[in-house]
Image (tube, rainbow, N blue to C red):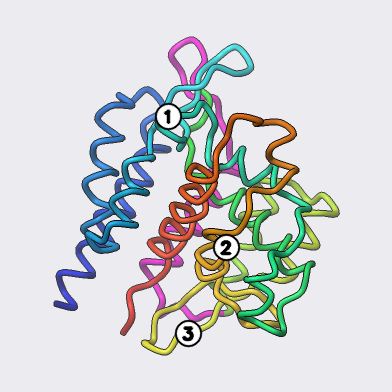
Amino acid sequence: MAGEQRAARRAFRDALLAVGDRPGGEPRWLTARLVEALPAFAGRTPDVLAAAEHLLVAAEREQGGTRLVLGLRDYQAGLATVLWLAGGCELPPAVRARWAGLGQEEWESGLLVAKLVLSALESRLLRDGEPVPDPGRDQLRSALAAFGEHPERGADALAAEVVAGLLAFGSETPDNLAATAHLTAARDGRGGLRLTLHPSGVHLGDLLAAAVGTPLPDEVLDDLPDLGQEEWDAVLHLTALILTALESEPS
């Protein structure tokens, strides 16, 4: 069973990284690969299957080119865009009740880090048939891949690489510096290495998963008035599963 789970995690992680590795890839094929790999990794529960049905790889036009993004099937918005709009929203009471030591600052940091990770999984911009160089994106993607594949390198070193990648990709803005100051890595109860918020000790994927079912923030509705609760829950659930897939397999 452990070997099968390890293989399923790797297959889903590879499917995620393939989106960014193939700027000119076929969105339909990339979507099908993700939708097949996600339940194999996370389990074929009704919640996971429902979340997978919302997942879509789409080509978005920007800056005179196109970029492949992770988005929602029935709503034209990227997962990263929805999380970006949620930045600054209040820590949901249900999440606060689960972790008494978790504060507003860590909640906002978790959303921002998750948004940057999702953005890095998108492809480089394809302009005139050629990918535009994006060294910060490449650095973060390499750090995320190493985090899941080489836990033997140690929590501190891997966390430092992810933080450096986040700042290289997102730039050293005050918000990004504040958010990454809360990011570390820690082993969970099964020995897996996970991205973790400091000082609360809440794992990043668990934070997003705990927010599923909480009310859709006004900050998101202001820009996406037609987005529904089901789509908001799908964004949170998919993000939690993606973050978990990028972490190391329990030892």
The span from disc 1 to disc 2 (Cα, nearest Å) is 21 Å
Q: Evaluate if marks 3 and 2 touch, with contact meaning CB atoms under 8 Å apart.
A: no
In front: 80, or 132?
80
Residue 91 drawn in magenta? no
Give the quadrant of residue 98.
bottom right
Q: In the image, what residue type sits under mark 3?
A: Arg
Q: Position of residue 172 (x, y in %)?
A: 79, 51
Q: Which residues are magenta?
A: 126-155
Residue, disc 2: 211
Q: In the image, what residue type sits under mark 2?
A: Ala
- Give the crowd class for mark 1: few <14, some 14-19, many >=20 residues within 10 Å: few
Question: Is most of the magenta stretch helix, strand or loop?
Answer: helix
In front: 44, or 246?
44
- Give the crowd class for mark 2: few <14, some 14-19, many >=20 residues within 10 Å: many
Residue visible at 33% across and 26% down?
A: 27
- Give the crowd class for mark 3: few <14, some 14-19, many >=20 residues within 10 Å: some
Locate the C terminus by quadrant.
bottom left
Up-down relation of residue 193 to residue 37 (above or below): below
Up-down relation of residue 52 to residue 106 (above or below): above
Residue visible at 14% across and 77% down?
A: 1
| Residue depth check, mark 1 versus mark 3: number of the one nearer the observer | 1
Residue, disc 1: 74
Q: Position of residue 169 (x, y in %)?
A: 65, 46
Q: In the image, what residue type sits under mark 1?
A: Asp
- Residue 161: give its label: none
Residue, disc 3: 187
Q: Evaluate if marks 1 and 3 touch, with contact meaning CB atoms under 8 Å apart.
A: no
Outermost residue, right side = 174
Q: Secondary structure at mark 2?
A: loop
Q: Is residue 202 left or right of residue 37?
A: right
